[in-house]
Amino acid sequence: MTRIRSVELRLIALPLVRPFRTSFGEDTTKDAILLRLETDDAEGWGECVAGPEPGYSEEFNDEVWITIRDHLARRILGADLSSEELGGALAGVRGHPMAKAAVEMALLDAELREAGRSLAEHLGAGRDRVACGVSVGITPTVEELLEQVEGYLSEGYQRIKLKIEPGTDVERVRAVREAHPDILLSVDANAAYALEDVEVFRALDELELLMIEQPLFYEDLLQHAKLQRELRTAICLDESIRSAADGAAAIELGACRIVNIKQGRVGGILEARRVHDVARAAGVPVWCGGMLETGIGRAANLALAALPGFTLPGDTSASSRYFRQDLTDPFVLEPDGTMAVPTGPGLGVSPHADRIEGATVRLERLEKNGLGGGIAS
Ligand code: SMG
Ligand code: MG
């Protein structure tokens, strides 16, 4: 065990190669909080999955900054704390899973770098490659959608997920299905529908989809269970699953038959593994979701996705799907649609200092006695 000396918060902005539109908004840049944590022996990096707006979840960057600075950091600075003990140390702060997950990622990275072990190894994730899919945003026209899908398929992605919203759904999905009768195809509504829209889902049910992701309100497991009973297609829950307890409840209620696991949404990599364990014990397949992470968060996702219960291709796409230049060495998709799990110590990646500096919008260093200073650039 080593003492946590400092936490550096950094807001970065990185242009996306193409806008990403979902039922709750459009992103043209990746705006994320990165965290660099120093212990007596090592440094570690974490990436928070929150965005600039509280659209996908309640958490958003300005709020995450305050949560970490004013509530999480002071509970850990100067402490001798392992990643296993972190949850307990932060338990006095209710909620804020994304902020907590970023701290945990950085602590795990530091700890494992010091120990010379990879995150995948630490998690007990045995695979060295994982199957990758890609999530396609809502496009202005069906032609553009077909073109993007074609491009991703030619790169080798093993599963295509289409974002949908009311009014831009069945027809689009049918067009893609007709163009590609045999691909693994799924849709993600990001909670944009209600149970009254059941006819939309009945129509989607005819299109041989792998799953329908988060169709209804994120707090409503019962409604999802009702909808699942009406459909052949598996419902997959994303926003609704914020912990292993949520996962267990959703499975027992029949609210889903597949679970999307995102470490940030459930409060960290260790809880993500517990969601995996609960689902695996119940025979429910899981896959690794994505939040348009830079190479730092992507490295963590790939380690997680190497666990045995991750039996479906994840939203673990290549760096080039998001950025012209990633903050780390790029993650590359093999022509067979798989990606290598990092093997180096900790996350197995390091951000390039010049790229990090170039992308930084805001920086603040936190130390035990409030000695750290803020720099706004
Ligand atoms: O990382 O490729 C990615 C994005 C995958 O579709 C994706 N994520 O609900 O699953 C989801 C969305 C959330 C994106 S929030 C900007
Ligand atoms: Mg989703």
Image (spheres, rainbow, N blue to C red):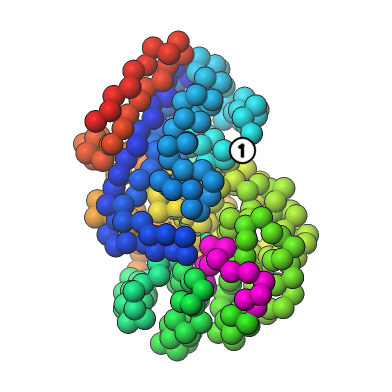
Mark yes or no: residue 377 visible: yes
Q: Position of residue 269 (x, y in %)?
A: 56, 42
Q: Quadrant of the C terminus?
A: top left
User: Which quadrant of the figure contains the N terminus?
Assistant: top right
Give percent across and percent down for residue 16: 29, 56
- Range of magenta residues: 185-198
Q: Is residue 341 visible?
A: no
**Which residue is painted at 57% across and 74% down in the image?**
210
Instruction: Give the residue drawn at x 38%, y 26%.
Output: 8
Q: Secondary structure at mark 1?
A: loop
Tag 1: amino acid: Gly
Query: Taking 234 as reference, is 311 above or below it?
Result: above
Which residue is identified by label 1? Answer: 95
Give yes or no for residue 193 being in the magenta stretch.
Answer: yes
Looking at the rendering, which quadrant does residue 92 occupy? top right
Instruction: Please indicate whether residue 151 sits to the left or right of residue 197 in the image.
Output: left
Check the image and report above or below for 166 versus 358: below
Q: What is the residue that sits farthest to the right in this orientation?
A: 252
**Nearer to us in this view, 57 or 132:** 57
Image quadrant where residue 146 sits: bottom left
Q: Which residue: 74% across, 62% down?
A: 222
Q: Position of residue 44 (x, y in %)?
A: 42, 31
Report whether 21 appears left or right of 269.
left
